[in-house]
Image (tube, coloured by chain):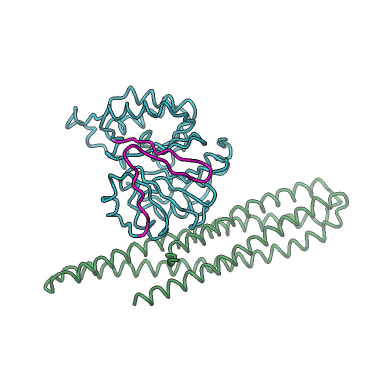
Chain colours: A green, B cyan
Amino acid sequence: MPEQPFFVSVATVAAGLGRVRRIASELSLAAVNAKVISVRAGTQAAGFRPITDFIDEAARATEKLGNALEAGTLAVSRSAVSERRAADALRRLRRAAAGASRDETSLEAVIDRCDAARTAISKSMTRSIRTLDGLLDQISAHMMCISVITVQSRIEARQAGTYRPNLEAIAASMSSAAEQVTAIVQQSRLDLRDALAARVEHARSKG
Amino acid sequence: MHSLRASSTREAKDKRLKTYVLYEGLHRWIAFGRDPEKPERIIDTNQYLIRDGDRSLILDPGGIETFSSVLGAVICHARIDQITDLFFSHQDPDVASSLGMWDEALPTARLHAPWLWEGFLRHFGCNNLTYVPIPDEGGTIALPHVKLQLVPAHYLHSSGNIHVYDPVAKILFSGDVGAALEAPDAPMFVDDFSAHVPKMTLFHQRWMPSNRAKNDWIARVRKLDVEMMVPQHGRIFRGDDVKKFLDWFEALEVGIAVRHPGSSVLASKPAAA
C-alpha cells in the first residue's frame, strides 16, 4: 500500500471536522426547543428556564467554533496542496539544473526563489496547524462545559412534572452532541498527529 | 428518484464548494461547484461524483488551482480509498490539469479518458493511475448498480470528446455542451431558460467548431431519456429545459470565428465573462 500523501491525510481530517458544524446545528435546535418547552411549562419548569440561556449560549459558541474549525482545517488543507506543488516545482528545477552545463547558473536564482516560496508555505502551514490545535483545545473545553450544563438540565428536568420527558430528551440530545463532537475532535487529533509524523518521516527519508 | 428538494436543503453554507445531491437511489449523483476560494480570472467549473457502493467516479475533476477545494468536498462523500475512477471528457486544463495531484492521491484508481488524448494527458503527470482509453465509438463503465454509457461527442468542442449518460438516474453529463459563462455565485440550476440563453450563446458559437458534429450529437442525445443535463460550466438543465436546450442548440450556428475573422467574438475570453 503506497504511503498516503500529506495533503490527502489533511483533507480527510478536514472532512471529519466538517461534521462538527452539522452537530452544532442540532445543538442550536435543542436550544430553541428548550426555550419553547420551558415557556410552555410555566412554573413547572421554573428551575429549568435559567438554564435555557446557557444552552442557547453554548449552541451559539459551538456553531462559531465549528465555523472557525472548518476554516482552519481548510486553510491547512490548501497549504498542504500548495506545499506539494511547490516541492514538485523545486524538484523539477533541481533536476533541470543538474542536467545543465556547469557554466549555467541562472537557474540558481530561480531555485532559491522557489525554495523560499516553499519555506514560506511550510511556515504558514505550521502556523495554521498551531491555530487549528488551539481551536481543537477550545472546542474540547467547550464540550466539557456542555456536559456540565447537561447534568444540571437533567436535575432540573426531574422537577418539571409533565414536561419532564421533553426536557430530558433535550438534555439527552445535548449530551449526545457533546459526545459526538468530543469523539470527532479526539479522532481528528490522532489523525493529524499521525499525518504530521508521516510527513516528518517522509521529509527525513528524502534527505 | 430525483431529490431536488433534498439537494437545495443540503447546500453547504461554508467556504467549501457548494454541494448538491442530484439523485439518490442505489447510487448517488452529487454536484460540486461555485468554489468560493477560486482564484480570479479562472473559469468556474462543476464537478460531479457518482457514488455507488465501494466505487466512486469523479467526472471532470477540474484544474490544478481548484484541486484542494474539489478534494476537500469530494472526501466528505467518499473515503479516499472509495474513489476508484476518474473520467475526463477531454483534455482541457480546466478538466485535467489536476491529474498529477490525483495521480498521487489515488495511485490505484482508473482514469477513463478518450484514447486520442492519452499521450497528451500524460504530460500532466500520470505515473500511478491506470489509463483506460475510451474508443471513438464510446463504451461503458460498469458500477455496482448502473452501467454508465460513454457517449461520443467529438468536436464538441474537443476532437476527442466523450459524455456520460446514466440510464438509471437519467442524467447526461454533457461536458462543455450546455456551458454558460456567468457570475461565480450564480444559481446551480436553470430556472428561466429564455433568460439563460444569452449566457450560453457566445460560448457555443465560438467554442463549438462544427455544425455537423453538433447535429450528430443532438440526434444521438434525442434518443436518450434525459431528465437532467449537467454541464461542466454554468447551470444544470432539468425536465423540459433539456429539450429546450436541444432545440436551441440545433438552431444555433456554431464555428462562427471562421466566417467572421476579426470580430469582437475572437477577443472574448471566458474568465472575463
Name the quarter where the N terminus of chain B is drawn.
Answer: top right
Q: Residue at x 63, y 54 (%)?
A: A23
Q: Which residues are magenta?
A: B128-154
Residue A174 is drawn in which quadrant? bottom right
Q: Residue at x 55, y 65 (%)?
A: A188
Name the quarter where the C terminus of chain B is drawn.
Answer: top left
- Seen in the image, is B90 located left or right of residue A102? right
- Seen in the picture, residue B87 relative to A155 is either above or below; the reply is above
Give B187 or B48, whichever is nearer the viewer: B48
Query: x, y (%) of residue B75?
Result: 49, 54
Residue A177 located within the stretch drawn in magenta = no
Q: Residue at x 60, y 52 (%)?
A: A22
Give B7 or A71, whichever is nearer the viewer: B7
Query: x, y (%) of residue A145?
Result: 69, 65
Query: x, y (%) of residue A83?
Result: 37, 65
Residue A50 is drawn in which quadrant? bottom right
Residue B153 located within the stretch drawn in magenta = yes
